[in-house]
Image (cartoon, rainbow, N blue to C red):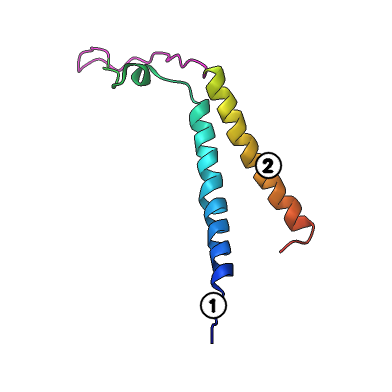
Amino acid sequence: MNFIEWGSLGQVLVAGLIVGAGIPALFALGLRLLAGTTPADASGGPVAPSSSDANDAPTSRAVAIPRPSPARLAGAIACMGVVVGAIAFGLVFLVSGGH
């Protein structure tokens, strides 16, 4: 007596990994590609704080973050497109009566 259908269990496991981990990972990768580089990323190390006395209040200064390069922007758009497409496919599948 074999109560477990191993082929079906494997299909459910693979689908769960793709939807449960793959789509969020693509979303995170897309966000990371959209984020510009900071001076710390460009130099390879942390940015040293400006010198100030211990009694001085920290001064706020604007940080300019450059736009991502066209290649990074294209990669981010591709990742987000796959995520939006997967969400749209899932909604259409469920609305059409799929199980």
At label 1, counting other C-alpha atoms closer than 10 Å, the crowd grade (few under 14, some 14-19, many 20 or more) is few
Decide whether residue 84 is among the magenta residues. Answer: no
Residue 69, numbered label: none
Task: Magenta stretch: give its range.
Answer: 50-68
Q: Earlier in the sequence, mark 1 or mark 2?
A: 1
- Image quadrant assignment for residue 84: top right
Identity of the residue drawn at 34% across and 20% down? 40
Residue 87 in the image, given as x and y percentages of width and height: 66, 46
Q: Amino acid at mark 1?
A: Ile
Kindly identify which numbered label has been placed on residue 85. 2
Q: Quadrant of the C terminus?
A: bottom right
Pointer 1 residue: 4
Viewer-proximal residue, 3 or 82? 3
The quarter of the displayed image where residue 96 is located:
bottom right
Q: How would you classify the magenta stretch by its main secondary structure?
A: loop
Q: Quadrant of the N terminus?
A: bottom right
